[in-house]
Image (spheres, rainbow, N blue to C red):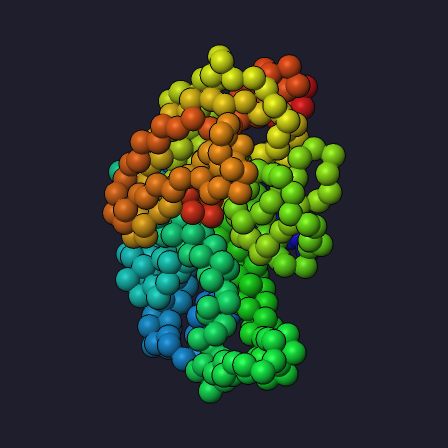
């Protein structure tokens, strides 16, 4: 079963799409002719805030067992600070006098700072920081707006990566949950094979059911993370950042039909057959796919910049596929060639997690390497900001061996794609 999680647009994203980012900035900074837009923005934010808060609470509860670990007093402080800040935003939007308007924004900013201090999770912090960024823009403080924007990106990117790791580790988490309930795995019965052992089978069924619940909870939480990522990208334009990349979330569970192993390019735990063969073997996977709008590809705090993309002149085209380019908007790959690719991967801001970096095309598609061999993994240590990657990898070409310009680099469960207009258009 495949879930395509489309963007859930926030009020900010919708209004920027309707009026433009400069008009939104003008409304926030008090331009008289844009007063209606300011009222519409803050009214939409206030109307949606309760829904976002309720949704956030549901997500936290389902992912973390909120009833067991969260301080309710701290939760009340967080929500009270958000509510007070929202009220000040509404008062500011209705205020005509510039000085009193600025005072209301300053009061709102102080309330949202209290909310960040009381936040209990990455996502709660990100929600409060988005309001701090709006207040900073309204007060004409671009540096403060940039600090808030960095905080949003750092918190949401870490949450997105954590969701992928939790999805991948659902079985081990299920084992811990069952053990906490006193359901330890049964001792192996040496007289019977595992598939004939009833106790083993019952335990395996409970384990699989618990893992399925964990993955379902993560899939339910992911659209909120995607929404915050999308909004952060849109708000970044207000402080001079380029237009945001397109983000797609792909979640694949274990229900897909499996086929016998075949010679294929390995990537992200899946075997991808050669053109014309049957569908791939699939395993549960949780992947963010990011298509760029410029030379750099950005996913929250993660940035990939291609410094060199050079097809090797002495390498001929051969049949092959690259799984991350098999669906729209990319033209399906049927042939591959080797290329020298230099990429800089940055974390801005630095993230509190070690990150695994690799190129999918560095797997079995390479000449002289086994098709089931995993690509070399590189590490960006926790707190580090940059990693320089230089490898010979397989890249998609047409049947004549001409490069389409497509390539990708993976950072944990995030696939950052570089592609040319020809690869996207299918021409």
- Marks counted in the figure total 0
The residue at 51%/17% (across/down) is 315
Q: Nearer the viewer, residue 392 or 197?
A: 197
The residue at 68%/50% (across/down) is 260
Residue 222's place in the image compared with 311, above or below, is below
Quarter of the image containing the C terminus?
Answer: top right
Q: Residue furthest top?
A: 313
Residue 200 in percent (x, y) is at: 58, 80
Say if residue 305 shows up in the picture: no
Residue 274 in percent (x, y) is at: 66, 35
The residue at 50%/59% (across/down) is 167
Locate residue 374 relative to residue 332 in the image: left or right: left
The residue at 71%/44% (across/down) is 279
Q: Residue furthest front?
A: 191
Q: Residue furthest bottom?
A: 182
Q: Nearer the viewer, residue 252 or 90?
A: 252
Say if residue 215 shows up in the picture: yes
Quarter of the image containing the N terminus?
Answer: bottom right
Residue 309 in percent (x, y) is at: 44, 20
Q: Nearer the viewer, residue 146 or 286?
A: 286
Residue 393's place in the image compared with 363, above or below, is above
Residue 106 in percent (x, y) is at: 29, 51
């Amino acid at each position: 079963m495949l879930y395509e999680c489309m963007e859930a647009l926030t009020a900010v994203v919708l209004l920027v799409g309707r009026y433009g980012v400069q008009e939104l900035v003008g409304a926030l900074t008090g331009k008289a002719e844009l007063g209606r837009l300011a009222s519409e923005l803050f009214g939409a934010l206030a109307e949606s805030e309760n829904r976002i808060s309720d949704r956030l609470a549901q997500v936290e509860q389902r992912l973390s067992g909120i009833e067991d670990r969260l301080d309710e007093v701290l939760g009340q402080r967080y929500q009270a600070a958000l509510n007070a800040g929202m009220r000040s935003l509404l008062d500011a939007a209705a205020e005509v006098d510039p000085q009193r308007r600025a005072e209301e924004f300053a009061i709102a900013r102080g309330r949202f700072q209290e909310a960040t201090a009381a936040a209990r999770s990455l996502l709660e912090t990100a929600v409060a920081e988005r309001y701090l960024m709006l207040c900073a823009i309204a007060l004409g403080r671009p540096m403060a707006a940039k600090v808030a924007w960095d905080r949003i990106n750092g918190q949401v990117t870490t949450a997105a990566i954590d969701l992928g790791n939790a999805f991948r580790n659902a079985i081990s988490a299920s084992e811990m949950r069952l053990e906490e309930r006193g359901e330890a795995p049964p001792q192996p019965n040496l007289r019977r094979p595992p598939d004939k052992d009833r106790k083993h089978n019952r335990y395996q069924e409970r384990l699989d059911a618990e893992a399925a619940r964990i993955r379902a909870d993560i899939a339910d939480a992911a659209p909120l993370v995607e929404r915050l990522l999308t909004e952060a990208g849109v708000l970044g334009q207000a402080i001079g950042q380029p237009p945001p990349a397109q983000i797609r979330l792909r979640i694949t569970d274990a229900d897909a039909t499996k086929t016998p192993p075949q010679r294929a390019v390995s990537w992200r735990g899946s075997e991808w057959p050669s053109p014309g063969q049957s569908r791939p073997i699939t395993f549960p996977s949780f992947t963010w796919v990011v298509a760029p709008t410029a030379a750099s590809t950005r996913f929250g705090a993660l940035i990939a910049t291609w410094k060199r993309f050079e097809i090797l002149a002495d390498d001929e085209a051969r049949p092959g596929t690259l799984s991350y380019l098999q669906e729209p908007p990319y033209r399906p790959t049927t042939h591959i060639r080797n290329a020298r690719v230099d990429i800089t991967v940055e974390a801005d801001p630095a993230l509190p997690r070690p990150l695994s970096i690799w190129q999918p095309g560095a797997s079995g598609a390479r000449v002289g390497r086994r098709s089931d061999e995993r690509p070399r993994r590189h590490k960006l240590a926790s707190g580090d900001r940059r990693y320089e990657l230089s490898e010979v990898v397989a890249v998609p070409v047409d049947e004549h061996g001409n490069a389409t310009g497509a390539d990708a680099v993976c950072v944990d469960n995030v696939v950052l794609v570089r592609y040319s207009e020809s690869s996207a258009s299918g021409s």
